[in-house]
Amino acid sequence: MNTRTLGHSLAAVATLAAFTALSAGVVVAQDRSNTGQRVAQERCFGVSMAGKNDCAAGPGTSCAGSSRVDYQGNAWKYVPAGTCTSIKTPTGMGSLTPIRS
């Protein structure tokens, strides 16, 4: 295997690993407290304010920032891993799966 083929193989593996992590709903992102530490985050449905979701706001929307109401059940926001179901909102708790109205 030459160096060029090895480089392409490594790039393909890295891309596949990134897609696998995203599809599982858990990502590693820059800590927002500016400590420089990277923390695992998960998708949490029903906790974002109108227009502040990270994605998935239902049919007819364009993804990030497209939720129409506060705490929309099918819109998610990234939160630190393990905290979603403990987030309390006026409509109930955060959920790891879409909340049906």
Image (cartoon, rainbow, N blue to C red):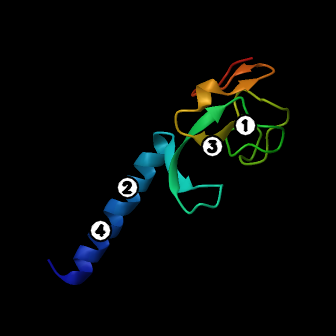
Within-10-Å neighbours for mark 1: few <14, some 14–19, many 20+: many
Within-10-Å neighbours for mark 2: few <14, some 14–19, many 20+: few
Q: Are marks 1 and 4 in contact (CB under 8 Å)?
A: no
For image coordinates 71% across by 46% down, the residue present is 63
Where residue 57 is drawn, which disc sits there?
A: 1
Kind of residue at disc 3: Tyr
Choose mark 3 or mark 2, whichever is in front.
3
Within-10-Å neighbours for mark 3: few <14, some 14–19, many 20+: many
Question: How far, Cα to Cα, is label 3 from label 2?
Answer: 21 Å
Q: Give the residue number, with chain letter if any, for mark 4.
A: 10
Question: How far, Cα to Cα, is label 1 from label 3?
Answer: 14 Å
Name the element at disc 3: strand
Choose mark 1 or mark 3, whichever is in front.
3
Relative to the observer, which residue lies in front, 62 or 84?
Answer: 84
Kind of residue at disc 1: Ala
Kind of residue at disc 2: Leu
Name the element at disc 2: helix
For image coordinates 72% across by 32% down, the residue present is 47
Choose mark 3 or mark 4, whichever is in front.
3
Question: How far, Cα to Cα, is label 3 from label 4?
Answer: 28 Å
In percent of width and height, residue 83 lies at 58, 32
In percent of width and height, residue 56 lies at 67, 39
Instruction: Name the quarter where the N terminus is drawn.
Output: bottom left
Kind of residue at disc 4: Leu
In percent of width and height, residue 44 lies at 62, 34
Residue 49 in sight here: yes
For image coordinates 77% across by 39% down, the residue present is 60
Q: Give the residue number, with chain letter if any, for mark 2.
A: 16
Q: Give the residue number, with chain letter if any, for mark 3.
A: 78
